[in-house]
Image: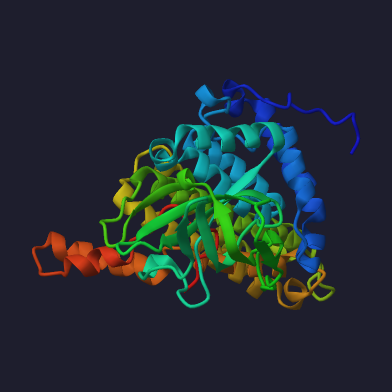
Amino acid sequence: MSTSVHRLPAAPAPHQLDSAEFAALLERVSAEFAASAERHDRDASFPHENFERLHELGLLGLTVPPAHGGLGASLAQTARVIAAVARGEPSTALVLTMQYLHHASSKTANNWPPHLRQRVIADTLRDGALINALRVEPELGTPARGGLPDTIARRTPEGWRLSGRKMYSTGIPRLTWLAVWARSDDDQPLVGSWLVHRDTPGIRIVESWDHLGMRATGSHDVIFDEVLVPLDHAVDVSPAGAAPDLDAVQLVWMSVLLSSLYNAVARSARDWLAAWLAGRVPANLGAPLSSLPRFQEALGQLDTWLFSNRVLIDAAADGRIAPADAFRVKYLVTNQAIAVVEKAIELSGNPGLSRANRLQRHYRDVLCSRIHTPQNDTILINSGRAAFAAAGHNVSKQAAVTAVTNLAPLTVKEAS
């Protein structure tokens, strides 16, 4: 990479996050990441160089509190970074989203032993370490739909011995810290997260990730075979059956960041279509397709959907939407993002479906927005139950909370 490229210092000050200079830097990051996005999609290869660049720019600690040496970015600032990264390479943005959620979580701040939290933060700021939760299992599926994990933490004199298999372990090619959802072998088991360092003996990665979309996330299976974990690494556990300890603020963050990511994918598709319509001059027309009212109307529809998404994201990021409504934002934004890319595919015809065209990649990527917990049916069912309950109708309390139990923290791809 040329040393003549202008860049901010490796650790920008918090006040720079809203500056024109920082916005220009994010535009360059988008362009840099976009240059290799097609290759990573084709090969399903992990974009290690993108995370090296983010570490160089001091952005892996974006949501680490300033008291611990991070930038302490607001949700609105964080959403802008995620959108910029996603415009370039959305798989990178997805792994980065989980990094930001962990460091911004009040549950991490309040529940983890302070020395472990500080160790993870120090690894991030010094070495560019990444962290994510590993939750989904072959038999259980997503824990957000209920059930206990098959991954077992067995008490021994030396510490916990962790055994089990996790799926969809997004970012595992580069993760340093794993927050593994498991249950203890006690008569009254504890359920929650055990913090595991990637280099601990007994961890094996099965390179199973070969999906249509978000192919560069490296979301492989991970097998734990009697992995020894110190006793104090049971960082966020509680008795099985206890009421879920949901972090309402983090649920808003998750909704906004996922929405920002997939809205950025849709914006990329829209921009490709607009340029293509302006440059496509059929011989029988003698003018660009953009001169036809049909395509002008269609682009107006896309821009209106994207305008709606921007209003929703900005409102949620600025705290103008109640936490109880956060997942409605995710539902609306991601479904409208899918609609944008689907419409672009429809309007472009065969060119948009060519493997050489980035539009088909945007389509495969944006469809993955449906995978993330909570999924569409859960969002709508909970919304309907809340409406009936508010009207005084009898709704099972257990049914009302089942779909949101164990939502935080989340792995990137929790699929049922």
- Report the side of 12 relative to 260 (left or right): right
Residue, x 79% and y 45% (percent of image)? Answer: 32
Residue 155 locus on image (x, y percent): 45, 57
- Dividing the picture into quadrants, the one containing residue 291 is bottom right
In the image, residue 376 above or below residue 19? below
Residue 186 locus on image (x, y percent): 35, 61
Q: Nearer the viewer, residue 391 or 307?
A: 391
Residue, x 47% and y 73% (percent of image)? Answer: 141
Q: Quadrant of the N terminus?
A: top right
Q: In this rendering, does residue 253 appear at all? A: yes
- Report the side of 55 relative to 243 (left or right): right
Residue sticking out furthest to the left: 392
Residue, x 51% and y 32% (percent of image)? Answer: 115
Q: In this rendering, does residue 292 appear at all? A: no
Q: Nearer the viewer, residue 255 or 167?
A: 167
Residue sticking out furthest to the front: 157
Residue, x 57% and y 28% (percent of image)? Answer: 71
In the image, residue 82 above or below residue 262? above
The number of numbered badges drawn on the structure is 0
Q: How is the image coloured?
A: rainbow
Q: Nearer the viewer, residue 195 or 280?
A: 195
In the image, residue 311 above or below residue 376? above
Q: Nearer the viewer, residue 392 or 134?
A: 134
- Report the side of 224 relative to 376 (left or right): right
Residue 311 locus on image (x, y percent): 45, 46
In the image, residue 8 above or below residue 218? above
Residue 362 locus on image (x, y percent): 67, 64
- Report the side of 244 relative to 397 (left or right): right
- Dividing the picture into quadrants, the one containing residue 216 is bottom right
